[in-house]
């Protein structure tokens, strides 16, 4: 009888535990997490942030394209995932946003980066197109000085947006998921902005982490101010407060850069021998890593790889070296090979690309590890005004950057100015990136770096800390803590 009674008590306790567990699961907030490209996967999935969120909420992933491998992986981890509806707007709505963005860039953002990049890119457009754009922008800017013009545009945009078909499509999709909040690393995308609007309508919490340190000053207007922002550094924080004066200390967290956590946890990476074999690189040679940029921004860039190849052919770079060229994720290898072709001095490494859109592709753990080992085992790094300068500096590799243009010499001063965009100024002030003002200087800096790298890496550690703030490899943990505070039931 005593045994039966004890067993009954045990059953009651077990049932209570199950009931409590079910209650906890049911009361966990359903947080929408957006994945819009490769960067989102690296930042949110590969760092473990998404998996960590499962401890205190139910992450619901919205993916911008149907990625079979990624969706299968997430489903296997018990993470609910859906494909976002297609996002298209009318020409009238696009024109309306263009006018608002003109006001935002000149009156609210007020970053020198805007003018620097516009002037640089103008050289690749036809004279007629540049003139038409300048006239159009001048007229719009003049109208913004008229009383109530801007406020009327902003009101009109809200009304017009709700008349767009995409608004109804996204609203239907959003409502079916019973979302309790939003976490994104791309708050500047219109798809994400629309989801944030729906959250705001229901007074749901929305958090934005900024994926890259240039995003705040290089992106356009959005109608939503998020409840909380997570950023890389003090500069990002100041930029946000300049744009959104209502943001206080409690609305912004400096976490560092989660995607840099891998750089500080390298014990499980490939050995150099295994990496050399995988990359088909020769043993016993120093390796010059050239990290290419996107064609949309630097169409003339393949000239620098050609200049390196010419130097090798003419024995102006020491024989015990080889070039490893890594293409940009948003670029195609073909445009580089068209210039340099196959050579005993160059090994090509293609970054992952999507088929529908270059950015629409999965980034696996192996992809991340290959990038990190490449940064670790290469000896000299070359890139054109890229974040890769920080990645390489973590490993104290000499950072060399072309600042000349033999294809269009009359405009090469515009290229040099690109290194002084707002987000890049702290890097330049660190004296860690060494600009080459000519082909001769480029080859001279490379030889100097190969012979005595320490001379060019004295400021590497300080530069890294200035940009990503934390070098402990725990940025993803800091982000997770913010999300738990905001989203835990």
Image (cartoon, grey):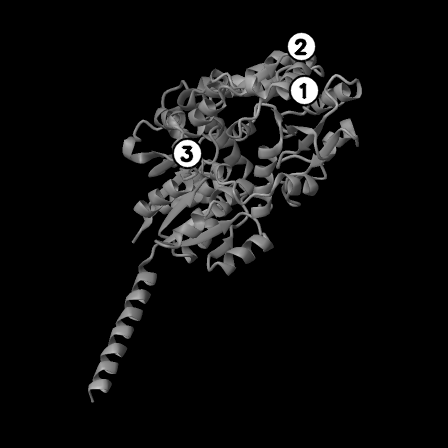
Residue drawn at x 67%, y 10% as measured from the top left: 410
Which mark, by number, is residue 126?
1
Which mark, by number, is residue 256?
3
Cα separation, mark 3 vs mark 2, equals: 39 Å
Q: Nearer the viewer, mark 2 or mark 1?
A: 2
- Residue 433: image location, x then y, percent: 54, 19
Q: Earlier in the sequence, mark 1 or mark 3?
A: 1
Q: Nearer the viewer, mark 1 or mark 3?
A: 3
Residue drawn at x 40%, y 35% as measured from the top left: 223
Q: Which of the pair 464/29 is nearer the observer? A: 464
- Residue 435: image location, x then y, percent: 59, 15
Is residue 362 something that shows in the picture? no
- Residue 51: image location, x then y, percent: 44, 52
Vertical placement of residue 17 versus 105, above or below: below
Is residue 404 something that shows in the picture? yes
| Secondary structure type for disc 2 | helix
Q: How many marks?
A: 3
Q: Which residue ends up furthest to the top in the rendered image? A: 410
Vertical placement of residue 121 versus 230, above or below: above
Which mark, by number, is residue 110?
none
């Amino acid at each position: 009888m005593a045994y039966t009674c004890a067993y009954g008590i045990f059953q009651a306790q077990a049932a209570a535990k199950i009931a409590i567990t079910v209650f906890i699961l049911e009361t966990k907030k359903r947080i929408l997490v957006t994945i819009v490209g490769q960067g989102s996967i690296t930042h949110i999935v590969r760092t473990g942030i998404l998996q960590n969120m499962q401890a205190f909420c139910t992450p619901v992933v919205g993916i911008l394209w149907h990625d079979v491998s990624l969706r299968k992986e997430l489903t296997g981890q018990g993470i609910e995932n859906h494909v976002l509806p297609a996002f298209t707007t009318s020409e009238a709505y696009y024109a309306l946003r263009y006018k608002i963005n003109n006001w935002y860039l000149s009156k609210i953002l007020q970053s020198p980066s805007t003018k620097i990049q516009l002037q640089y890119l103008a050289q690749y457009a036809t004279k007629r197109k540049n003139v038409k754009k300048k006239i159009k922008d001048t007229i719009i800017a003049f109208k913004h000085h008229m009383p109530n013009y801007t406020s009327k545009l902003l009101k009109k945009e809200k009304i017009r947006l709700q008349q767009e078909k995409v608004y109804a499509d996204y609203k239907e999709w959003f409502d079916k998921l019973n979302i309790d909040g939003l976490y994104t690393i791309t708050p500047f995308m219109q798809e994400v902005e629309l989801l944030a609007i729906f959250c705001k309508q229901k007074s749901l919490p929305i958090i934005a982490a900024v994926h890259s340190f240039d995003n705040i000053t290089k992106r356009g207007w959005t109608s939503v101010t998020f409840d909380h922002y997570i950023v890389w550094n003090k500069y990002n924080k100041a930029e946000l407060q300049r744009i959104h004066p209502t943001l206080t200390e409690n609305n912004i967290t400096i976490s560092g850069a989660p995607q840099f956590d891998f750089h500080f946890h390298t014990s499980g990476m490939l050995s150099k021998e295994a990496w050399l074999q995988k990359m088909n690189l020769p043993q016993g040679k120093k390796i010059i890593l050239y990290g290419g940029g996107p064609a949309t921004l630097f169409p003339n860039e393949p000239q620098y790889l050609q200049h390196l190849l010419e130097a090798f052919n003419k024995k102006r770079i020491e024989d015990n070296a080889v070039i490893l060229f890594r293409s940009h994720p948003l670029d195609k290898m073909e445009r580089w090979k068209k210039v340099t072709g196959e050579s005993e001095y160059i090994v090509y490494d293609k970054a992952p690309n999507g088929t529908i859109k270059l950015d629409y592709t999965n980034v696996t753990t192996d992809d991340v590890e290959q990038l990190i080992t490449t940064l670790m085992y290469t000896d000299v790094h070359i890139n054109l005004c890229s974040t890769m300068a920080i990645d390489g500096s973590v490993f104290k590799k000499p950072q060399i950057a072309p600042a000349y243009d033999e294809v269009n010499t009359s405009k090469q001063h515009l290229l040099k100015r690109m290194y002084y965009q707002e987000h890049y100024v702290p890097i330049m002030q660190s004296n860690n990136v060494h600009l080459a003002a000519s082909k001769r200087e480029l080859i001279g800096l490379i030889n100097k770096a190969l012979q005595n790298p320490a001379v060019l890496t004295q400021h590497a550690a300080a530069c890294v800390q200035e940009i990503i703030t934390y070098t402990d490899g725990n940025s993803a943990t800091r982000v997770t803590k913010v999300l738990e505070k905001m989203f835990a039931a």
